[in-house]
Amino acid sequence: MIEAPFLLYLGHSTDPVGIKTSRGLATFRTRDCVGEFRHDGCPLTLGLPRRTMEEAAARGARTLVLGIAHPGGAMAPSLVEDAHAALMAGMNVASGLHHRLRDVPSLVALAEARGLSLIDVRDPPKDIRVGTGEFRAGRRLLTVGTDCSVGKMYAAIALAEGLEARGRVSGFGADFRATGQTGILIAGAGVPVDAVVADFISGAIEQLAPARQDGGWDVIEGQGSLFHPSFAGVSTGLLHGAQPEAIVLCHDPARVEMRGLPGRRLPDLDDCLALNLQVARLTSPRVYAAGVCLNTASMEEGPARALCRSVEDMLGLPATDPHRFGVEPILSLLCTAPSQPATIASR
């Protein structure tokens, strides 16, 4: 577990999507956040008090979370300088970037000298096995997307919380299974699937959500998109390892092109659903679509609700914005669908 309270890092960021880790912590672990650190040229904010390193430490912050993400995950020199400043102020430093803190000698030396910790969240477990595709007991739901960074984690958390609330009445449990840096920081555990060697991705998810006999749900956070050339491999491994009973499609209607790939349009919702179901059937032949989660943050409420109704009419599935409107329609479908019996996968 990463020691709280946190100071959330925005640095010089200008891309609202790129600060999704800091935003996720500000949303789901608000009480653990003492403020945000950003430079004068940063136009973004999480709505938290702006703090210097020294101010945050004086208010009890124990860890600076480098809550930014961008393709490649490298650390800019300015970010390394800010991590130095955090250590000098007496805070640990946590990062979910692909570039590891432990690979920056100056940070390692300073942390050791001051008795502080460097935490690299994107370190996968060392005992991952190759996936088998053998059927296992339990009910599992996987969020999938038309693109990366469209709300798969938000949807998964909302669905897990909703299922858990229903389970307190009906006698079953539900757990959020994190697969990305933000989800891991929120949940305190998980597998950073994009840091797992490709041959082991499905096995990592089999271990993350093993067989369960209590009738409860594992809600697995999806990553990437089958339609994104950069990240479709991770998405495929997740679909096979999750062996989902159900999938929920996530989409940002304001997105006009794939993140990081100018000019490449997003897939149609029905095409995206169809391909995800097809790929999932390798290990879960009876998988079904349980709904659509739309990220309508850029829309007024009226048009957002109208869009949800339009998607429902088009696909014949419940559609909602999980953060604004809740997930009750999807929960109702999940909780009335019979659990699928385990069978032996075709070979």
Image (cartoon, grey):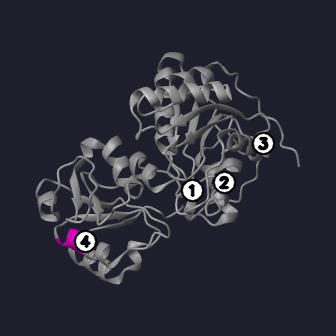
Q: Residue at x 59, y 61 (%)?
A: 263
Q: Residue at x 29, y 60 (%)?
A: 10
Distance Cα–Cα, label 4 vs label 1: 31 Å
> Residue 45 or 210: which is nearer the viewer?
45
Q: Earlier in the sequence, mark 3 or mark 4?
A: 4
Q: Earlier in the sequence, mark 2 or mark 1?
A: 2
Q: Earlier in the sequence, mark 2 or mark 4?
A: 4
Residue 97 position, x and y percent, is 43, 66
Name the mark nearer the viewer: 2 or 4.
2
Residue at image mark 4: 82
128 in magenta:
no
Q: Are marks 3 and 4 in contact (CB under 8 Å)?
A: no
- For residue 258, the mark is 1
Is residue 1 shown to the viewer in this render? Answer: no
Q: Amino acid at mark 4?
A: Asp
Distance Cα–Cα, label 3 vs label 2: 17 Å
Residue 223 position, x and y percent, is 57, 52
Q: Earlier in the sequence, mark 3 or mark 2?
A: 2
Q: Are marks 2 and 1 in contact (CB under 8 Å)?
A: yes
Q: Amino acid at mark 3?
A: Arg
- For residue 227, the mark is 2
Read off the magenta span.
83-88
> Residue 204 or 76: which is nearer the viewer?
76
Name the mark nearer the viewer: 4 or 1.
1
Callout 2: SS? loop
Distance Cα–Cα, label 2 vs label 4: 36 Å
Callout 3: SS? loop
Q: Magenta segment, principal secondary structure?
A: helix
Q: Earlier in the sequence, mark 4 or mark 1?
A: 4
- For residue 281, the mark is 3
Q: Earlier in the sequence, mark 1 or mark 3?
A: 1
Q: Is residue 261 left or right of residue 53?
A: right
